[in-house]
Amino acid sequence: VSHYHDDYDAAKFQIETQGSVALLETLLHKLHEIQKGDRLANIKESSLDSVTEFYTKKSQFNKALYWAEIWSKFDERNLTASVRLYSIQRKVPSLKNNAISKLEKLRQRVPESELVSITSVRWALQDNRYRDALSAAHTYFQRTYNTFHLPWQVYWDTGTGFTDAQSI
């Protein structure tokens, strides 16, 4: 396992010093069979994050899209992976509308996600869809902060179950 960490560190160093992801792509090919929950899953996920970020910054969207799709399939519940995938798709003219639609569906599923909401608002503002931006922001604030004023009730279990006498 430690040699995979060494490979990842070497790949990150190569990105910083040489502006290349060759080692990172080699590592990702080695990690191809790794699934979510495996011991090496965090290295695979970090590698996918790094390679998609690298290609996006270089405006190499086909390569970025390739790795973002792999990342999104690797962990379908990872919001960062989903937003990265949709952000890359949005930069490809033929995929832009699909990306906006998918982000909106994701925002409706997890309206309390700051990353998803901010991305949705930013895109709407960039596209001059001001009502959509306001609606997304309103939903986020409403879902996130609407219950702050409600009193909390705390229960603890002493081994005999929860009772009202144990609440504060």
Image (cartoon, grey):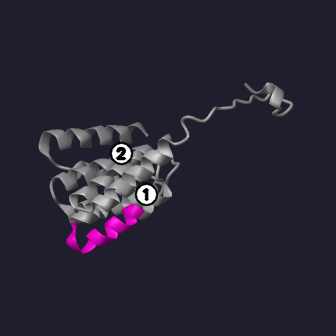
Residue sitting at x 31%, y 54%:
121
Q: Which mark is residue 46?
A: 2
Q: How many neighbours does mark 2 have within 10 angstroms: few (below 14), some (14-19), or many (20 or more)?
A: few
Magenta span contains residue 126:
no
Q: Position of residue 116 (x, y in %)?
A: 38, 52
Q: Quadrant of residue 74?
A: bottom left
- Of mark 1 and mark 2, the one earlier in the sequence is 2
> 35 above or below 66?
above
Residue sitting at x 28%, y 47%:
50
Q: Where is residue 139 in the image (x, y as percent from the top left)?
A: 44, 52
Which quadrant does the C terminus fall into? Answer: top right
Q: Is the magenta stretch mostly helix, strand or loop?
A: helix
| Residue linked to disc 1 | 107
> 157 above or below 111?
above
Q: How far apart are marks 1 and 2 (CA)?
A: 24 Å
Give the number of the mark in front: 1 or 2.
1
131 to the left or right of 160 = left
94 to the left or right of 27 = left
Magenta region:
92-104
Q: Where is residue 38 in the image (x, y as percent from the top left)?
A: 51, 48
Magenta span contains residue 98:
yes
